[in-house]
Image (tube, helix red, strand yellow):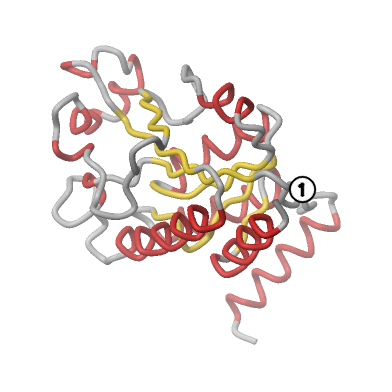
């Protein structure tokens, strides 16, 4: 066992012993929430990591979305759309001036070829990190009878984390897909996944999520 793996196991044991790392599990009616998978993080986008982490996460997200569609589960996309000068992003735009990349009409806010919404799939526009804050997402999910939010997208330490936390706080079972989340910093990615798994969501491998979506689709 490597030192890094050993340290991770020790850390998990410590958290578990203190009463963290419980499991919420997936419910019978999941929806996949695709958070901000857009051109700003891919290719030559202003937030791209230059090391392929976002592209790998995009590919994983594509597989999860296709599995959800095949199983008949709802898929929801989020998209940041800001007014000129980011006037509707408040202090968030002051803290992160780069958010001007998401002004209405910017190509950086566009979806990649895949995953991208199909006709009839819900696209939630937002101005802040969480897909639930100031949006109709919770009401839309409840109207569909959804009990579980499968969260993936960009970035792990930002909008994915905020959305998974708010899914929990809005009464949905939050599941986060490890490989389908991307971040500019590998350390931030890993630490935030660990913290989410310890306190707010179940962080699962893509293979586990694919099996879960297929099983719940077959049980419908």
Q: Can you give x and y, in whole percent of width and height, for residue 59 in the image?
A: 36, 64
Indicate the quadrant where residue 145 lies. top right
Residue 114 position within the rendered picture, expressed as x and y whole percent measured from the top left: 30, 55
Of residue 48 and residue 24, the one placed in the foreground of this image is 24
Q: Quadrant of residue 42?
A: bottom left
Q: Position of residue 136 (x, y in %)?
A: 50, 20
Q: 200 left or right of 95?
A: right
Residue 35 in the image: state x and y as whole percent.
42, 41
Q: Is residue 183 left or right of residue 205?
A: left
Q: Nearer the viewer, residue 65 or 80?
A: 65
Identified at 60% across, 80% down, the residue is: 3
- Report crowding for label 1: few under 14, some 14 to 19, many 20 or more residues within 10 A (C-alpha): some
Residue at the spot 19% in from the left edge and 25% down from the top edge: 103
* Residue name at image x 62 percent, y 50 percent: 175
Query: Measuring 35% from the left and 58% from the top, which residue is drawn there?
Result: 58
Q: Which residue is mark 1?
A: 24
Residue 207 against residue 72 in the figure, above or below = below
Q: Quadrant of residue 61?
A: bottom left
Figure quadrant of the N terminus? bottom right
Q: Secondary structure at mark 1?
A: loop
């Amino acid at each position: 066992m490597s030192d890094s793996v050993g340290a991770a196991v020790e850390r998990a044991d410590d958290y578990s012993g203190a009463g963290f790392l419980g499991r919420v599990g997936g419910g019978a009616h999941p929806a996949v929430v695709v958070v901000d998978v857009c051109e700003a993080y891919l290719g030559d986008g202003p937030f791209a990591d230059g090391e392929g982490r976002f592209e790998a996460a995009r590919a994983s997200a594509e597989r999860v979305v296709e599995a959800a569609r095949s199983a008949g589960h709802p898929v929801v996309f989020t998209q940041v759309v800001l007014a000129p000068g980011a006037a509707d992003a408040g202090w968030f735009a002051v803290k992160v001036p780069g958010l001007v990349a998401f002004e209405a009409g910017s190509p950086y806010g566009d979806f990649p070829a895949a995953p991208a919404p199909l006709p009839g799939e819900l696209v939630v526009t937002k101005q802040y990190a969480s897909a639930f804050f100031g949006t109709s997402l919770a009401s839309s999910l409840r109207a569909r009878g959804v009990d579980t939010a499968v969260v993936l997208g960009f970035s792990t330490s930002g909008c994915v984390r905020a959305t998974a936390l708010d899914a929990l706080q809005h009464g949905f079972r939050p599941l986060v897909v490890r490989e389908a989340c991307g971040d500019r910093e590998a350390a931030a990615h890993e630490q935030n996944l660990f913290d989410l798994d310890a306190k707010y969501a179940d962080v699962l491998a893509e293979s586990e999520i694919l099996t879960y979506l297929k099983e719940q689709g077959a049980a419908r």
